[in-house]
Image (cartoon, rainbow, N blue to C red):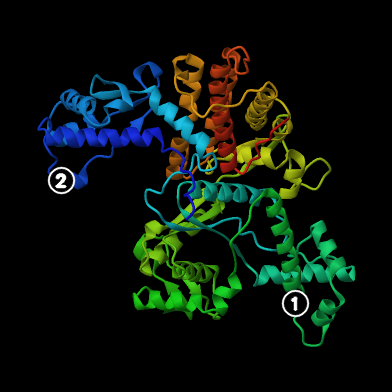
Amino acid sequence: MTNAAPVAPAAIRAGVRAAIERGWSSAVANGALPALVDRAAAPAIEVERPGNAAFGDFTTNLAMKLARPLRRPPLDIAEALAAAMRSGPDAGLFTSVDVARPGFLNLHVADAAYEALVAGVLVAPTAWGRIPAVNPRKVNVEFVSANPTGPLTVGNARGAFVGDLLCRVLEAGGQQVTREYYFNDSGAQINHLGASVAARKRGEPVPEDGYKGAYVEQLAAAVPDEVWAAATADGAQEDAVLGGWASRQVRGMIEASLARLGVHFDVWKSEASLHDEGWVERAVARLRDAGEVYEQDGATWFRSTAYGDDKDRVIYKSDGRPTYFAADIGYVTEKFSRGFDHLIYIWGVDHHGTVARNKNAAQAMGYDPEHYQVLLIGWVRFVADGVEVSMSKRAGTFVTLDDLLDAVGTDAARWFFASRAAHVEIDFDIELAKKQSAENPVYYVQYAHARIASILRKAEAAGLAPASSIEGLLSGEPESALARVVSRLPEVVEDAVVAEETQGITAYATELATQFHAFYRDARVVDEAEPERSARRLALALATKTTLANALGLLGISAPESM
């Protein structure tokens, strides 16, 4: 029989929320508060950190939310809740439960809770920060999905960052996530790529609607003899044959670029397979059975206007060829057939017009439209020395993801994308991202981690080691302040899962690094004259190091041991 893996401590905020709920139930049970007529309509218990730490570690407005349904003044409700919490089983969690007008409950958490949390971090460092799923889901996240007709550009790069970061956060929140890349491996653009390769192979100008990048020259030079022979054989579809071969090479380039970024996909799905495997026909059949398809002018249409769209949408053109919309609805059916509870698509903001029609079709096919979600990401403007960098091939500029990583490195690139909401346009400061100083926020956070590692090495050389507990240490202000910031990692993860954004994690990591630097300034950590206190301070430093590493790990950023 094997021992179970250590479990990291639960978030203190979650414990506070549960204590408030138990206090509410107790106040109802002892008659201090009336029961809600409809408990299913009970307001959510919101627990926040007050702007002024003097008011406590947490505050809740539950009493004000209950005032209307209970028809009582919020101050009276708050007093009843406070009395129940002070005398209930969770009383030991708090040093005080105070009521403030017009009905807030301000809660001061006992040091013992933070001491226990830090001890738990030391016991289960790898699990620290991961939280159980409130509503476990099987989620499919499809992102990047650039056509295999050229290297990944910086225009596609933000989708790679946003998608991977979101997947990491959802997994830390207990969700089962599948990363998926959808590529269009058929149709006109693949033929155009083939025609471009053929032209370069023959030393001819690229067609006007072809691809003119330097990579096309490289592809043309690398065409195997047998592929060229097959493409140029009598009756062969030269553009399609060469385009198919070239697109596979480009996909390999894309995979290599993404691997360099640390992004890997569980599923690579081709548009052609949706047609070949009959998923488009299945989707159309579902719509037809629902009475949402009609024929007009030789084309097949979806009644999208019945769901609020400005016009109906063509599925099959009058010549029988499917539209992109046809593949989109086939893809929805194919994904849900794999048992996913929720679909997330990460698209550029220029795809805004596509969202409604696809969601409408999902609803018409019988799927819950709330489980078809699209995140639209804003444009990126790259800036160097305050001047926008043009997207050209000139020396000193870059257009591909690889060029970006060459310029600033993977860690800095990840940080700068993670620190902004996905939907907003951002200015990416190339020179700042390259700096090896505290001006660069990722360097600042990584330096804090490396500094703690150095302190621990120094302590070991002096014969000192971290204690297993920090009991009694939090009477000091620098220690107390640092432990309280360390404790917040699970809260930050929970908030990131709910918001489906990562900028809260970068802000938290920066705050924790700043708090550690203040702690190290004000508290002597390695002190051979006071080995017991030093051991406890080292334990707090080690818990901080673990927290920084796990926060950075959520972002796919390294936590160096030295810098």
Considering the numbered disc 1 on the image, is that residue within a helix, a strand or a loop?
helix
Residue 236 spot, x, y in % from top left: 77, 84
**Residue positioned 28% across, 33% down in the render:** 19
Q: In this rendering, would 455 be left or right of 5?
A: right
From the image, tell me which residue sits under label 1: 241
In front of the other: 479 or 396:
479
Q: Is residue 220 above or below residue 508?
A: below
Three-letter amino acid code at the position of disc 2:
Asp
**Residue positioned 62% across, 51% down in the render:** 160
Q: Is residue 469 visible?
A: yes
Three-letter amino acid code at the position of disc 1:
Val
**Residue positioned 24% across, 32% down in the render:** 89
Considering the numbered disc 2 on the image, is that residue within a helix, a strand or a loop?
loop
In front of the other: 178 or 500:
178
Residue 526 spot, x, y in % from top left: 63, 18
Q: Is residue 197 above or below residue 555?
A: below
In front of the other: 263 or 371:
263
The answer to whether mark 2 and mark 1 are in CB contact below 8 A is no
Callout in the foreground (2, 1): 2
Q: Is residue 346 above or below residue 104?
A: below
Which badge, 2 or 1, comes first in the chain's sequence? 2
Name the residue at the front extreme.
1
**Residue positioned 75% across, 75% down in the render:** 239
- At label 1, counting other C-alpha atoms closer than 10 Å, the crowd grade (few under 14, some 14-19, many 20 or more) is some
In the rendered image, the quadrant that contains the C terminus is: top right
Residue 51 spot, x, y in % from top left: 40, 21
In front of the other: 543 or 325:
543
Q: Which mark is residue 38?
A: 2
Name the residue at the right extreme.
203
Q: Is residue 200 visible?
A: no
